[in-house]
Amino acid sequence: MEDGCVTLTGYSGSAVQLVLPTYLEGMPVTAIGVDAFSDLASLESVVLPHRLEVIENSAFGYCANLRRVTFPPSLRRIDYYAFYRCNLDSVALPDSVTTLGYNVFEENLHLTKASLGSGLTGLDSTVFSGCSALETLEIASAGSVAGFSGSPALRTVVLGGGVRAILSGAFADCPALKNVYCSSGVVSIANDAFDARAGFTLHADGGSFAAAYSKQRGIRFSEYP
């Protein structure tokens, strides 16, 4: 306990489902500490405290059966390896999240959908490393996007108004890619951001940078919205 707030530092049970408390002894739970729930083989779902702000390093790392996490709208930061080698089906981060550490969701082999909110200020290229089942990616804001090359199942990418650049190799070697939706906020796309042989469609406003890019690179284009 510090400054009237509580950090959860450990758990010795074997629950399958956990609803973590919002208050302990009348004080709000605002952080989950390093390794607090790591390597908890029984855990399949967790509802995080409603006033939680920070998930620290490896807090749920190696929870091999963890499939569902409910993130609260108060959450600001998730530190590195927080959900490393879990078994999440999907990730939906609220707009309150501004920071993701590296390798946060690495090797969640059954993760099929990731939706990142509008508060995110950056996205490290390792956050979803090894998530080989990822099919749908929605990024409302991140500044720049990279790190999804070699995603074998990725079919749909939606980039919101807070994304400004698609970096080199960002979506190269994604053989299943079918549709990429770009907002007018995207003003820079690397020449090799996508595999030139991919048969995907780029959807964007007709007067946008993405529209001009698709014409220059010979990419199939559809006006959107």
Image: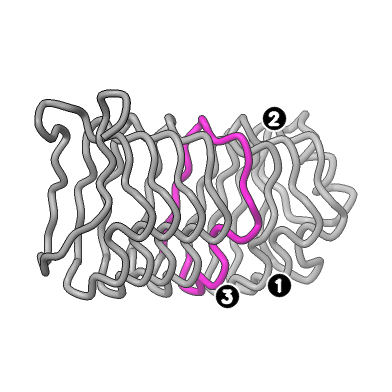
Q: What type of secondary structure mainly makes up the magenta span?
A: loop
Under circle 1, the secondary element is loop
99 to 91, vertically: above or below: above
- Say which residue label 1 marks: 173
Apparent side of residue 216 relative to residue 160 in the rendered image (left or right) = right
Instruction: Please give the range of residues in magenta.
Output: 112-134
Under circle 2, the secondary element is loop
Q: Residues within 10 Å of mark 1 (few under 14, many from 20)?
A: some
* Amino acid type at mark 1: Asp
User: Foreground residue, 151 or 147?
Assistant: 147
Q: Residue at x 51, y 47 (%)?
A: 138
Q: Residue at x 13, y 40 (%)?
A: 21
- Queried whether the magenta region covers residue 119, the answer comes back as yes
Q: Quadrant of residue 14?
A: bottom left
Q: Position of residue 108 (x, y in %)?
A: 42, 69
- Say which residue label 2 marks: 185
Q: Which mark is residue 152?
A: 3
Under circle 3, the secondary element is loop
* Amino acid type at mark 3: Pro
